[in-house]
Image (cartoon, rainbow, N blue to C red):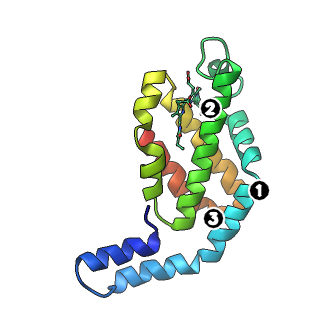
Amino acid sequence: MQDAITSVINTSDVQGKYLDTSSLEKLKGYFATGELRVRAATAISANAAAIVKEAVAKSLLYSDITRPGGNMYTTRRYAACIRDLDYYLRYSTYAMLAGDPSILDERVLNGLKETYNSLGVPVGATVQAIQAMKEVTAGLVGADAGKEMGVYFDYISSGLS
Ligand SMILES: CCC1=C(C)/C(=C/C2=NC(=C\c3[nH]c(/C=C4\NC(=O)[C@H](C)[C@H]4CC)c(C)c3CCC(=O)O)/C(CCC(=O)O)=C2C)NC1=O
């Protein structure tokens, strides 16, 4: 896993150089938003279950997906879906704190699409639920932190698509 700091340091180290202006600007931006990131992570962890629940209500409930024949039908599969959404929320929060998406590649997206395809888990509906979490989260943490979280929700969405 990388973060905003190791990412610019590794890039400079490969070239055997001190940080250039654009790397220093990136770091400045990251440090300037440190407080915002920590505050957002605190609010998200205190409200994680409610965020997932509201996102499911907005995107999946009362659709064919929760009826017999749908992939969320049966309590076991419903629970697996809720658990997956909680993974996406938690790992997006880690990535937002790190300011870098690499943890999502390593721990979430690696092999996920293949698993979903082999189990018949619908990717389109999953992406809708992730986008609903993006909206609900932005409503909770405010526009600036919401935009930052949105980067990582979108990263998972495109990694699945
Ligand atoms: C931390 C990284 C990580 C991820 C991401 C993860 C995902 C993941 N989701 C799974 C299943 C599943 N995922 C879903 C999810 C859904 N079905 C729907 O219709 C909805 C649209 C959607 C929720 C938004 C369902 C229903 C299953 C169970 C499928 C089955 O067994 O038939 C499985 C198969 C094994 C299992 O059932 O536990 C994995 C590995 N596991 C991990 O360790």
User: Residue 105: in sight, yes or no?
Assistant: yes
Question: For the N terminus, which image quadrant?
Answer: bottom left
**From the viewer's perspective, is residue 126 above or below residue 106?**
above
Q: Is residue 10 left or right of residue 130?
A: left
Q: Nearer the viewer, residue 31 or 59?
A: 31
Residue type marked 3: Ala
Per the image, the residue denoted by label 3 is: 145
Q: Does the closest atom of ligand 1 sit within 8 Å of the Cβ of label 2?
A: yes
Across and down, in percent, residue 149 comes to 58, 58
- Tell me the CA gap for discs 3 and 1: 16 Å
Per the image, the residue denoted by label 1 is: 46
Q: Nearer the viewer, residue 100 or 63?
A: 100
Across and down, in percent, residue 12 comes to 30, 79
- Tell me the CA gap for discs 2 and 3: 26 Å
Query: Regarding mark 2 in the picture, which secondary structure is present there?
Result: helix
Which is in the foreground here, disc 2 or disc 3?
2
Per the image, the residue denoted by label 2 is: 81
Disc number placed over residue 79 in the picture, else none: none
Q: Is residue 22 left or right of residue 157?
A: left
Ligand 1's quadrant = top right
Residue type marked 1: Ala
User: Residue 161: in sight, yes or no?
Assistant: no
Query: Regarding mark 3 in the picture, which secondary structure is present there?
Result: helix
